[in-house]
Image (spheres, rainbow, N blue to C red):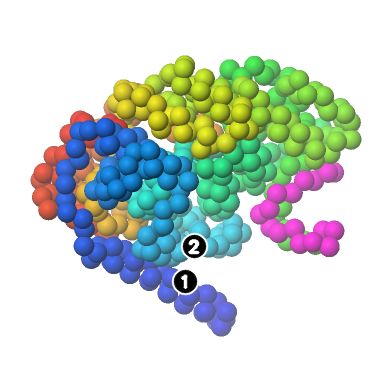
Amino acid sequence: MISRRDALLVAGGAAIAGCGRLATEARRRKPAPEYRAKPKDRSARMIDRMSFGWSVEEADRFASLGEAEYVERQLKADFDEPLELTIQLQSLDCLRMNGFELIEIPRGRVTQQLQSAAILRATYSPNQLRERLVDFWSNHFNIYAGKADGAFFKSNEEEQIIRKHALGKFRDMAIAMSKSPAMLVYLDNNQNFKGHPNENYARELMELHTLGIDGGYTQKDIQELARCLTGWTMEDRSIWASHALRARGSFYFDKSKHDDGAKHVFGLDLPAGGGIRDGELVVEHLVSHEEAGKYLAKKLVKFFTGAQNLELEKTVLDQFQKTGGDIPSMVRPIMTAPALIEGPPIMRRPFELMCAALRVSGAATDGGPALQNHLKKMGQPIYEWPLPDGYPVDQLSWATNLLPRWQFVYDMANGKIPNTFVKAPDAVALASQLAHPDFQYA
């Protein structure tokens, strides 16, 4: 027999979900801006590189502000979010509940909701540079939703760490991520304890999250860092500790499993008895290191311009060092560099292609399973890359899977994707535009 509380929860969830469907329908019925084909000019190239793709609304926003002010507003991410988007997002359980609450919901449904949120934000948010950076950082700190309970804890990490710090300081983001329960479990640090060290998280923290594979660390550094991180895990119970509630799903330092001996990591001496500060001090050392700045500068420049540019990377590194890793200060010179406009074409990854097609066509969508199925066929279901290095950014990884891309374009332009409605007046012309080789690139 269902309890009154459970009945209210079910009714409330249904009401919220219903609001999400109403918001999708409202977006569908909302008058679309006059349809215009994307021009081939500087503004369109800038928008394509800074956002998930040119749209009539984005072009009008760019024109009304001017190039310099548009860049600054995007770096501040201070545009108001559309009401329909806010309502659609509020209808998703994964954004309203914590990880252990979500465990009561089927894993596949939670993953679908995570993907819906990503598609909706990338398509409809006017703060496009922030969304691009959320995509960049989520891939940089990749977590596979399919491992263990990753799907249930990924949303909290995405909201409380990635999105919170995407335009903040890299130092703050990386330090918060070092204690992310989702990351600790994904990279097996819950199995890292005194006498039986597990090096998996320590290795990826250096190789992927901070210094890069050429960052100058050694295998001995990895071993010593793993010792520093013994006892770093996720609380899987709700208990009272020191007169405060330690919630399920939160970070927990288990001192009984910590190796408290002296350590030496990447030039840093740590005396015995440091406890949790062993790991904290090393992470603080790594996230501020020049090698971390070089690694991030190279990744950011290539992400936005499509190629390595040593001069621009040096400028970004200088900003990393001068500002303590302030992300807007690092990204600003890329947004104003000639390389942003003059760089080689960048083949859109499937997620980018999908959002660009939705944006340029003025489509209304719920970002739901039908759309996600196309994303899976194109090879990039969001949050489902099993390796910690994130989805590839090199073009060769995506250049050989074109048929599913063309099928998506055809189905979208011809109204064959449930709950996705195209507002462009000429489906044939739109399909031709989206299938054109030029549209595959930003």
Residue at coordinates 74% horizontally, 49% vertically from top-left?
A: 252
- Of the pair 216 and 340, the residue shown nearer to us: 340
Quadrant in which residue 70 is drawn: top left
Q: Say which residue label 1 marks.
A: 13
Asked if the stretch drawn in magenta spans residue 254, the answer is yes
Q: Nearer the viewer, residue 333 or 369?
A: 333
Q: Position of residue 107 (x, y in %)?
A: 50, 55
Q: Quadrant of the C terminus?
A: top left
* Amino acid at dot 1: Gly
Q: Quadrant of residue 191?
A: top right
In the rendered structure, which segment of residues is drawn in magenta? 241-256
Packing grade of label 1 (10 A; few <14, some 14-19, many >=20) is: some
Between the C-alphas of marks 1 and 2, the distance is: 8 Å
The one of 70 and 283 positioned closer to us in this rendering: 70
Query: Which quarter of the picture shows residue 287?
Result: top right
Question: Does 305 sit left or right of 2 as displayed?
Answer: left
Q: Tell me: residue 371, above or below residue 337.
A: below
* Residue 123 in view here: yes
Q: Residue at x 36, y 28 (%)?
A: 340
Image side of residue 107 versus residue 342, left or right: right
Q: Are marks 1 and 2 in contact (CB under 8 Å)?
A: yes
Tell whether position 219 is magenta: no
**Taking 284 as reference, is 379 left or right?**
left
For the point 85% across and 58% down, which residue is it?
A: 242
Give the mark nearer the N terminus: 1 vs 2.
1
Helix, strand or loop for disc 2: helix
In the rendered image, which residue does mark 2 sit on? 93
